[in-house]
Amino acid sequence: MKQPVFVAAALLLWSFPIFTQTFEEIPPGGGGAFHPEPTVCLTDAQRTAIAAMLVENEARLRSQRLIAPDDANGTVAFDWPIKNDPGLGSSWKNTIMIANYVDQQAATGILDYNCGTRSYDGHKGTDISLWPFGWHLKNNNFVQVVAAEAGIIIGKQDGNSDENCVWNNQDWNAVYVRHSDGSVAWYGHMKKNSLTNKAIGTSVAKGEYLGVVASSGISTGPHLHFEVYKQQPYLVSNLIDPYNGTCNNMNPGVSWWANQEPYRKPTLNAALTHNTPPEHGCPTENEIPHFSNQFAPGNQLVYTAVYFRDQMQGQTTSMRILRPNGTIWNSWIHTSPQTYSGSWWWWSWALPSGGPFGTWSFEATFDGQTIVHPFEYGNLVSTNSGNDSPALTLAPNPANGAFRLLSTEQIELEIEVFNGMGRLVFSGKTRTGQEITLGELAAGVYAVRVTAGSHVRHYRLVLE
Ligand SMILES: [Zn+2]
């Protein structure tokens, strides 16, 4: 008697959301796994040279009393060594995936701390790779390396090319920090001339800037190689794997993280729009993001894309495209066919040619995380109509560094200018007729958003 009642209740619960939202599975137009080609990060010869340099520096600093003679009682609890620049914007929640953990297997073979194989043979550090668009992130200094623990800088290497895509024997750019307990962290592959200007022998605080994530040295894409020794000499017998797990034989039962992240951390890194399917770089091609946040009616398709760290098999992502008034134009789901360390998927859409025009949004929800990515749809020349707000003209257009918003009446305006990648390059308050000087912006097409009270207008501005 009880069982049928339960079944009916379960059916009701299951069917309820179907009436409120569409859960149609739409296969992506493309995408899949992202994983940088593994490289050794450092050759044995490079590691030997670095070790000799650090031993020499440490002896000198000790004689100069810049390192305390008895400092073996300190403790180390690493914070995450990666920090995102706020300029990245809200369409990005995360910028990394774990490409490789430390290889615990002394002999030939691969074993990570969690008894998996997310490493390569002989890897002595943790590789934290930028994802997606590592070259875009690197070029814009969007992802910083920060000190995981406070300490003294005992070595720096800089001046080496940071755009490596394939195996080579070049040296990297790196900072080496000795902690109060005598352990040392190596931060490698950083951007040329991005290193902290603090000198060797100077202290750095936990979380302090060390440099920008890039691809110097033996590297196939922008990533941080984070390698830790509990003390000198810099031999495998002193190597630490900061992660605590069943197969960590280096420092069993001890995590060096203040708050260790899980082995897999499902994360929606970014939700973006493009005007062509993006091309991810290395080793065979250069990265071409094809970012676009402005679309005109006509033949142009809108490409919506989602990017993940640790997307697990069977995990669903629900996505929707909203009209300017917030109603859903389309919604769909994606189910991950596999487990990936890094992954991405895209879909393309033809928006209705008659509009509505204005600020649309692409939204994605994954594992309780939602990203809202706004984009502009319309002819962008002037979308004003009706008598509810004063007409504005943007002049001159094309402009040469300065322009005015003209109107029949004097009103206060808020103005925002976005470049072709959708990045805010200017914002400020103005009045109609007042000159707006943009400064040194590259020639090209910009989107101008003007807010007058509750009215928002979009314009296309050409800078010469
Ligand atoms: Zn590495």
Image: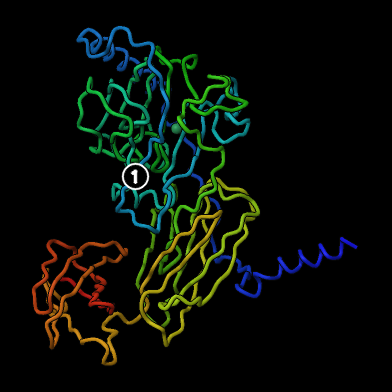
- Point out the image quarter for the C terminus: bottom left
- Point out the image quarter for the N terminus: bottom right
For ligand 1, give the image quadrant.
Answer: top left
Local crowd at mark 1 within 10 Å, few (<14), some, or many (≥20)? many
Specify the farthest residue to the front.
1
Asked where in the image residue 375 lies, by quadrant, the reply is: bottom left
- x then y, percent, for residue 304: 47, 66
Report how many numbered discs are placed on residues in the image: 1
Asked where in the image residue 177 lies, by quadrant, the reply is: top left
Relative to 105, is 427 on the left or the right?
A: left
> Quick one: 296 or 394, which is closer to the camera?
394
> Quick one: 258 or 109, which is closer to the camera?
258
Relative to 298, is 366 on the left or the right?
A: right
Q: Amino acid at mark 1?
A: Val
> Quick one: 63 or 345, which is closer to the camera?
63
Relative to 55, is 443 on the left or the right?
A: left
At x 24% / y 73%, what residue is drawn? 448
- x then y, percent, for residue 313: 64, 51
At x 41% / y 48%, what residue is drawn? 95
